[in-house]
Image (spheres, rainbow, N blue to C red):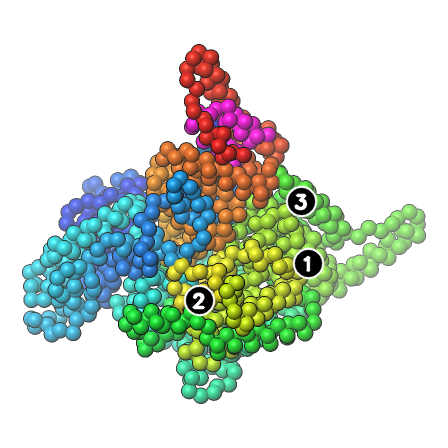
Amino acid sequence: MAPKTGKTKPHKAKGDKKKREEKVLPTVIEITVETPDESQVTLKGISTDRILDVRKLLAVHVETCSLTNFSLSHEAERHGRNRFPETLPSDHRPRLSLPTDSYLILLSEDYTEELAVAHIRRLLDIVACTTSFASATKPPACKSKDPTEPGSENGSETSPRVKPVDPNSDSGNAKTDKVDGDISMCPPPRLGQFYDFFSFSHLTPPFQYIRKSNRPFLEEKTEDDFFQIDVRVCSGKPTTIVASRIGFYPAGKHPLVSHTLVGLLQQISRVFDAAYKALMKAFTEHNKFGNLPYGFRENTWVVPPVVSDNPSVFPPLPVEDETWGGNGGGQGRGCDHENRQWARDFAILAAMPCQTAEERQIRDRKAFLLHSLFVDVSVFKAVSAIKNLVDIKQNSSLPTSYEESIGDLTIKITRDVSDASLKLDCKNDGNRVLGLSEEELAQRNLLKGITADESATVHDTPTLGAVLIKHCGYTAVVKVSADRDLEGSPNSSEIDVEEQPEGGANALNVNSLRMILHRPSTLQSSNAIQRIHGTDIEYSRSTQSLVRKVLEESLQKLKEETTRHRKSIRWELGACWVQHLQNQATGKTEPKKEEEAKIEPAVKGLGRQGGLLKELKKKIDNKNSKVEVGKDISPSNNDNDINKQEATKQELERQGEEKETIWRKLLSEAAFTRLKESKTDLHLKSPDELMEMAHKYYVDTALPKLVADFASLELSPVDGRTLTDFMHTRGLQMSSLGQVVELADKLPHVQSLCIHEMVVRAYKHILQAVVAAVDNVSELASSIASCLNILLGTPTSETTDEDIITSYELKWKWVENFLLKRFGWQWKDENGQDLRKFAILRGLCHKVGLELVPRDYDIDTSCPFRKTDIHVACSSADGRTLLESSKTSLDKGKLEDAVNYGTKALSKLVSVCGPYHRMTAGAYSLLAVVLYHTGDFNQATIYQQKALDINERELGLDHPDTMKSYGDLAVFYYRLQHTELALKYVNRALYLLHLTCGPSHPNTAATYINVAMMEEGLGNVHVALRYLHEALKCNKRLLGADHIQTAASYHAIAIALSLMEAYSLSVQHEQTTLQILQAKLGSDDLRTQDAAAWLEYFESKALEQQEAARNGTPKPDASISSKGHLR
């Protein structure tokens, strides 16, 4: 075998020797748990696991997933027993002290009424997959046919190797349909299949229902009895069961008491026992390592299929079912924090010591807990106030704004206007929240950026203490009052903030704050529903007229708008600029940001893109040479020149003193000191000069560098969300998308993503304006459906309705003008032909907060959407963005540490964010990739499984991080020889990838290579070659014939051909691989040496084959090579 692909080492800082000593990778441990029935369960954990992690492992094991109320005791040989109770503060979760022989005993605990309800909720949750996720059309019992490999967080650079391609590609997952030997590489997206991956509807549900019973107790109720439930198993009569302190028992039959409800039902019903065991068997077949399909929340833009049957009730999934003690997560429900002194808490937070890493870690934990609580409370208060306004507005007219104060919080609500041409300010550090002019805000952000340190976010109290929420046509700004008098010195006080339950799991799901748009009266018989659906397809004249009116008026105002060059600046731009100047001064290369951390080395050659990069870098170097900061050159040829020099020096000193006086007025002493010590000489410039220089850096350096990283696959966005994240973390505005399109003229996939994002934003303005124009909530669903039909529908040749045709033409005029005014980019008619409408629909739902029924929409008709498809509107997508992004900024940089310095940094991250936060999931995922590249596939799988479980439940089922976890996990399973399981997961990834970025994307091509490797592992070499051929075409088209990713495709084809013993063809393809790598990486790169070793191997096998042919041995059939698959 050829040597493993080499990895270039990242840049080392001065203190790296010490950090290398701290790098300690974890080890796999086996944990044996003895259950109450004296059976034993063996769990595979890692040395970083704690008791809370063991509970999670028990919850995803088929033999223990139904257990909820227990404690664990730790028993080692000749040692006493240490008992770990049900709940522990997250800062005091005990570690497992034994590395290999951990033995735990599971002890049943008495229930309280709340815990008994939670136990029933767990069983409902486990069984939900048999009833809640079945698609309207019968779900295909498909066997997956695809794989992926792990890699950096977002890039998809692939090194030639035998096994799957680098998984950095957030793999998407397309169902691979095989009909008569044909493969559909990218079938049309079908939302009706969205939940098929989680559905077990082919199984008989173990029970039909569980309900709280109103029946009287058969025996006298004791103080140990809580309540009764009625259970009807899959066949038979309802059974009344009593929930008590010690467990569950049939009414009147106390001797049959069982600590678990499953155990009791298995005792009294053979039918339930058989059905439950069949479900557990299916769980094992689905994934014997865990990742059981329960615990999901309705946090995705596609609602579970069960909602379609009862839209007016919107049946919640068990985790969020308030009937059984569930909720939408988060803290701060009720009135517990009505009188909290937020201003005092944030002042104390800003004053906490932060000189050492340990002090910052303690401070960051407090900041994370306080800000998380503040966001949750603010969202609850704002949404509650908005819903009250909506209810009042139905009966009377209401002013367009409303304001109230609750303790330290000020809530200001304004009604959105039905003008789509207005620029929306939806940032918690924007003009609307901070009350600053555009120029003042730009200067504030720039100064914050160039003086930023580890405490920049925490010390920015005005931004940290503000939340902006959009919901149902209203915008709420919640702020901490800044004029409160603080009692005592903040330095001597402590912040009293409670720990998050369950280690931070079950964070607030803003979708759970939805407004139900359908009334119970819409519930009819099945025939009536058919008739309603038929009428829904017809256009509602009134709502269509409303949408057209909004479009016409907004378009007219947009045309009349004068073009203004905005000078806004994100604070991240200042931080990146300083870093760039420091690196330029010391000759260092630009370090990667946390979201951009990669395990793969930087690409040194870009094939067809080489010219582009050389041109960009030359431009950057030229511009930088002109903008050297603080260095003035004076002529000195004679005595007069010397005198002039002296005068100039004195003048410069005077100007320097004046500027220092200005800076000391604008900045704190500490901030000015940091700026002065940054060795960038920025303190020698005036604020106005800095603004001009920052804008010049933005245009001449930051934007070209972004495109260069896109070209090298250093960054590889898959949708508008990842594209936005990459730009914002570099301080780039989304209004620059038009410039990115122009700079990326040789990167069609990047251009496509940018164009789609611009269109999504243009549509968002129209949809939000339509929502704001609707006065009656009962008309909201039909208005939204009409708007979506105009935005995404397509009039056919049979369409005769002039209004539909007029609206369609009006929409494109809006898009053309909006893109020109907001992004400075000229829309062309041919751009409309290449739009992926499902990707636009997904982005639109994310931004506006819509949730749709999962059915197969015929997007090529004029009216693909109907009223009943829109079940929820405007559930504060901006709130979701805030929850995902603003909290992560509190701990900036630690993900990169997790990659570079192993588990010690991971433990620091856990100590700040908790073990089940999305940031921690990112760290798990990156550490999994580190372990994968060390060859420890078992540990990599365990960590990636942790990441996937968190991402599915906390971020959503199609979030880019979730998508990436599916793809990476598939590769880990493949390397563990579980090929069919790997195919199942990579199919899920491909389905999502095709839904988001489509087939023409490097990540999709990388995934095709992985699919091919897995198909080959199952003996389907011909199928593998087709995938490889598609990947090669895609890479050559998108990246160039001599890109490294294209070399990976040639190498993979060479491997596949060798398995068919077509070694001469393998030699040809590996020669091409080697030529590309030698040209781009040089002969010393380990990947080049890898390819050379493979070529030598193929040549030796080809010679052996030729020798055998001369000796009369039959030549192997390599006829596939002549059938056009490799041309």
- Report crowding for label 2: few under 14, some 14 to 19, many 20 or more residues within 10 A (C-alpha): many
Secondary element at tag 1: helix
Residue 944 vertical position relative to residue 245 in the rendered view, above or below: above
The amino acid type, in three-letter code, at marker 2 is: Phe
Please name whichever residue, 419 or 947, is drawn nearer the observer in this view of the structure. 419
| Residue 694 circle label | 1
The amino acid type, in three-letter code, at marker 1 is: Ala
Q: CA distance from mark 3 to mark 1?
A: 24 Å
Please name whichever residue, 425 or 344, is drawn nearer the observer in this view of the structure. 425
Q: Position of residue 881 (x, y in %)?
A: 48, 63
Q: Please tell me which residue is depicted at 57% across the width and 53% down the height of the picture.
A: 752
Report which residue position mark 2 lands on.
865
Q: Main secondary structure of the magenta part?
A: helix
Residue found farthest to the bottom: 396
Q: Earlier in the sequence, mark 1 or mark 2?
A: 1
Q: Position of residue 754 (x, y in %)?
A: 58, 56
Q: Quadrant of residue 588 in the image?
A: top right
- Residue 525 appears in view: yes
Please name whichever residue, 123 or 1016, is drawn nearer the observer in this view of the structure. 1016
Q: CA distance from mark 3 to mark 2?
A: 43 Å
Asked if the stretch drawn in magenta spans residue 639, the answer is no
Where, quadrant-wise, is the N terminus in this rendering? Answer: top left
Q: Earlier in the sequence, mark 3 or mark 2?
A: 3
Q: Earlier in the sequence, mark 3 or mark 1?
A: 3
Where, quadrant-wise, is the C terminus in this rendering? Answer: top right
Q: Position of residue 59 (x, y in %)?
A: 27, 53
Badge nearest the viewer, 3 or 1? 3
In this picture, which residue range is highlighted in magenta?
A: 1048-1075
Q: Please tell me which residue is depicted at 31% across the width and 46% down the height of the picture.
A: 287
Report which residue position mark 3 lands on.
612
Secondary element at tag 2: loop
Secondary element at tag 3: helix
